[in-house]
Amino acid sequence: MAEFQEISLKKGREKMLSRRHPWIFSGAVAGGMEAADNGAVVIVVSSAGNYLATGHFQKSSIAVRLLSFSDPAIDQAFYENRIQSAVDFRKNVGLEPKDKDTNCFRLINGEGDGLPGLIADFYNGLIVLQYHSYGMHRQREFIETAFAEVMGKSAHGIIGFVQGLDIVGINDNQPQDQFNQGDGQEVTETGIKYLINPFKGQKTGFFLDQRDNRVLLRQMSQGMRVLNTFSYTGGFSLNALKGGAMEVVSVDSSSYASEMCKINEQVNGFSGENHEIVTGDVFEFLKEDPREFNVVILDPPAFAKSRKKSHNAVQAYKRLNREGLKKVKKGGFLITFSCSQVIASQLFEDTIRAAAIECGRPAKIIKRLGPGTDHPVSVFHPEGHYLKGLLVHLDG
């Protein structure tokens, strides 16, 4: 272990590793941080010098993102093993690269797949990576080669981005021109086609975590009037149309998202006669448009990315859901989400309750919603449960 840099924990803090949480915060570290290179593979030792774990060091509040508790070499073979395990799991739950009905899904979900700091999404042969830690970015050659080895002919390209790091630009040799020249990569999700563009879109190009919830909406849309707010490129809207909705209204502040929503509508052969696409502020639309709907979807971006901003986020969620509830016809449904990691499930549910109280609507929770099986959450890392949702029925 001499070739590794060491991070030593304060006396008594080694017990925290028995909980198998994949993060070590800087406050638990006794020594080694000043000498450690940003993004380096380090070993974590106890105050007595005994080996505890191996991980990536970062000069931040999360000092080490743990990769292993058994001291393996963190090399290409390590990444190949982790990626192969993730691919095998997805095949076991029915997600395969060559599937004609769904050929886009998450391949690596950070801590949920034992690779904290790395996100990988599969889009019909294109793998889009997000490096959320310096350690993962520093080992990107290992990682991208490992993906190529594991995926073989199932992958025709790999694109890597940095997210939230002080690194300018993207990796070398990115095929950006092909996306600038066209509308993007065509994918299919549960029988619906989408064009995704990782260079222009949000996340890696699409919100893969909502797949199951989009199907839920499709199953309940027959003859319904549906309002989809923060509609992005039309995932919920297209499922409502496919499910036989009488009317769909899509609202998003992004003109790019609205344009792609229209293109996706056309790609799937919908006429557009019963689909209105609005580019504008969602809060203003909810207050000013007089219509009511059988189903209202509220899927906003994260209102809080740190605990310091959680109070303001809760107030924003309450205002949004209060106005959304007002738009639901008697006997209709509200489908509402939060993707703010710092807003816990119970707090989100309490916020929806407060919104219902303020607008005086009798409501009941029908179902609690979350991401699909390709977004696993480690039992040791509850913070990974970022997407929370509720299906709410309005009795009156």
Image: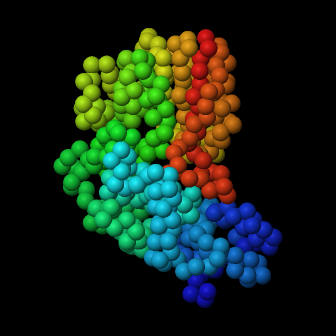
Q: Nearer the viewer, residue 345 or 199?
A: 345
Query: Residue most toward the left?
Result: 181
Image height of 380 relative to 14, above or below = above
Q: From the viewer's perspective, is 224 left or right of 200? A: right
Q: Quadrant of residue 23?
A: bottom right
Q: In the image, residue 57 lies at what x, y percent?
A: 57, 70
**Numbered-mark total:** 0
Image height of 144 relative to 226, above or below = below
Q: From the viewer's perspective, is 17 left or right of 301? A: right
Q: Quadrant of residue 116?
A: bottom right
Q: For the N terminus, give its image quadrant.
A: bottom right
Q: Kindly tell me whether residue 316 is visible in this rendering.
A: no
Q: In the image, residue 14 lies at what x, y percent?
A: 76, 71
- Residue at 50 percent across and 71 percent down: it is 81
- Residue at 66 percent across and 32 percent down: it is 349
- Residue at 42 percent across and 21 percent down: it is 222
Q: Kindly tell me whether residue 264 is visible in this rendering.
A: yes
Q: For the C terminus, give its image quadrant.
A: top right
Q: From the viewer's perspective, is 175 left or right of 71? A: left
Q: Nearer the viewer, residue 145 or 175?
A: 145
Image height of 250 relative to 145, above or below = above
- Residue at 47 percent across and 67 percent down: it is 84
Identify the image's colour scheme: rainbow, by chain, secondary structure or one colour.
rainbow
Q: In the image, residue 87 lies at what x, y percent?
A: 46, 61
Image height of 321 relative to 176, above or below = above
Query: Residue most toward the bottom?
Result: 2
Q: In the image, residue 101 lies at what x, y percent?
A: 36, 44
